[in-house]
């Protein structure tokens, strides 16, 4: 793998930040303690965080190149719009990588970036998703209630959970004897529900309960 572009995005959970960082460092040749590698993790990336990144990325790198990795559970549209100039005209030698939730990037931002060629996602799984798929409908409902009990960060936890379910369903789809019709419908439902997460007040319980009742047990 060779990172030749100046800006990349990776759609996935923020828990993959260490793996993405390690892969990017290796590919770009940055040593472990390089002062030109800047890694930040946010619950929410807003306009203030965007402006701070723009200011920081304007500084000249000590070794002639710099790496900025931003991982966030939520990214605002205004923040993305503010980044457009940086994505169009970055400082020479600067590489930007954004780890964001699935479907959260504006088309104008996405078009200025390349997908980050992360090769470790296949080995990452979500324990909750695996337990959910093995559970009975009653156990699934209990798991959903527990997941939604804490209000803060619920939407992003639900997004990561849906992403993990989708990965497991996709993996199961290729296995011999799989209930492919049910798995395909499940993946379609997940894609639809994930798009609803951007609404002002999505009914997380209703969406997850639907999956609890319809996804095959395996």
Image (cartoon, rainbow, N blue to C red):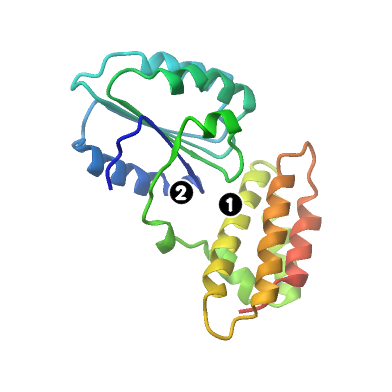
Nearest the camera: 188 or 40? 188
Nearest the camera: 108 or 104? 108
Q: Quadrant of residue 54?
A: top left
Residue found at the far bottom of this picture: 177
Q: Quadrant of residue 3?
A: top left
**Cβ atoms at labels 2 and 1 below 8 Å apart:** yes
Whether 109 is drawn above or below 144: the answer is above
Mark 2 or mark 1: name the one nearer the start of the chain: 2
Q: Residues within 10 Å of mark 1 (few under 14, many from 20)?
A: many
Disc 2 target residue: 15
- Determine the secondary structure under disc 1: helix
**Residue at left 55%, top 18%?**
82
**Residue at left 53%, top 84%?**
176
Q: Residues within 10 Å of mark 2 (few under 14, many from 20)?
A: some
Quadrant showing the C terminus: bottom right
Q: Quadrant of residue 119?
A: bottom left
Nearest the camera: 24 or 206? 24
**Residue at left 43%, top 57%?**
121
Residue 178: x %, y % from top left:
60, 81
Whether 91 is drawn above or below 134: the answer is above
**Residue at left 35%, top 49%?**
19
Cα gap from disc 2 to disc 1, whole angstroms: 10 Å
Disc 1 target residue: 160
Whether 118 is drawn above or below 201: the answer is below
Residue 8: x %, y % from top left:
42, 36
């Amino acid at each position: 793998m060779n990172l030749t572009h100046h800006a990349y995005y990776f759609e996935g959970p923020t828990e993959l930040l260490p793996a993405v960082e390690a892969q990017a460092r290796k590919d770009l040749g940055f040593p472990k303690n390089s002062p030109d590698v800047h890694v930040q993790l946010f619950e929410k990336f807003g306009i203030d965080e965007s402006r701070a990144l723009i200011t920081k990325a304007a500084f000249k790198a000590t070794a002639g190149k710099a790496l900025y990795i931003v991982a966030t559970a939520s990214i605002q549209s205004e923040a993305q719009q503010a980044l457009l100039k940086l994505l169009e005209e970055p400082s020479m030698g600067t590489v930007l990588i954004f780890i964001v939730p699935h479907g959260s990037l504006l088309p104008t931002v996405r078009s200025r970036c390349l997908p980050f060629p992360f090769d470790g996602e296949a080995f990452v799984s979500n324990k909750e998703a695996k337990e959910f798929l093995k559970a009975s409908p009653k156990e699934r409902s209990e798991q959903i209630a527990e997941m939604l009990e804490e209000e803060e960060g619920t939407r992003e936890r639900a997004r990561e959970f849906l992403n993990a379910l989708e990965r497991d369903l996709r993996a199961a789809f290729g296995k011999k004897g799989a209930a492919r019709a049910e798995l395909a419908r499940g993946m379609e439902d997940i894609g639809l529900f994930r798009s609803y997460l951007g609404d002002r007040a999505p009914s997380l319980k209703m969406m997850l309960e639907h999956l609890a009742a319809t996804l095959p047990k395996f």
